[in-house]
Image (spheres, rainbow, N blue to C red):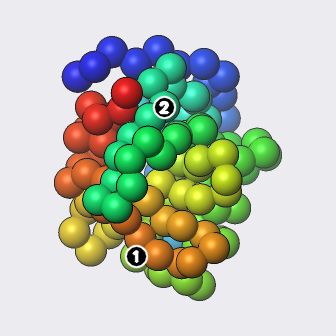
Amino acid sequence: MNQLTWKYVKPLGTELAIEQFESSYNVKLPLDLVAVFKQYNGGRPDKKGFNTSVKKDRVLKTLLSFNEGDLETIYKAYDVLKPEDDKLIPFASDPAGNYICYQVTDESIVFWEHETNTKEKIADSFTEFLRGLY
């Protein structure tokens, strides 16, 4: 995997923060995503660029946080996104307020455009998404 350096990491407020989210929303996140969040919750990687099936050079701003008191949290993002598509679990944002999401139906990673409520496929898994950052 390309080595990522993370800044602005917010340690999880509790060891069970991710499990509490999964339980509250009755969802199950992939193990590779959970492992990264346990280390880099709310962090920003040094490699931010990624491509989707539709557009090149999209930008990752930050991983969302599993700490409910933080500014950009998975709770707030999921509450925004759920009425639009309850099969998407946002885990990161871009500078324009769009989300990078785990798609429950096929376990892929997609980009969700908030102005048009459209999806663009990024990768088949979270690990593949991280490997593709440049």
Task: Residue under label 1, please give it.
Answer: 87
Q: Is residue 23 visible?
A: no
Image quarter where the C terminus lies is top left
Image coordinates for residue 5, horizontal then vertical, percent: 47, 15
Secondary structure found at label 1: loop
Residue at 59% x, 38% y is 62
Name the residue type under label 2.
Answer: Lys
Which mark is nearer the camera, 1 or 2? Answer: 2
State the image quarter where residue 131 is shown. Answer: top left
121 left or right, relative to 67 = left
Residue at 47% x, 46% y is 58
Name the residue type under label 1.
Answer: Lys
Image coordinates for residue 16, horizontal then vertical, percent: 52, 43
How far apart are the two marked residues, 1 and 2, measured between alpha carbons?
25 Å
Q: How many marks?
A: 2
Using the image as rendered, state which of residue 40 and residue 119 is in the foreground: 119
Image coordinates for residue 52, horizontal then vertical, percent: 34, 54
Residue at 63% x, 73% y is 115
Image quarter where the N terminus lies is top left
Point out the tag, 1 or 2, that comes first from the N-terminus.
Answer: 2
Using the image as rendered, state which of residue 30 and residue 108 is in the foreground: 108
Task: Residue under label 2, please give it.
Answer: 48
Is 90 placed above or below 51 here?
A: below
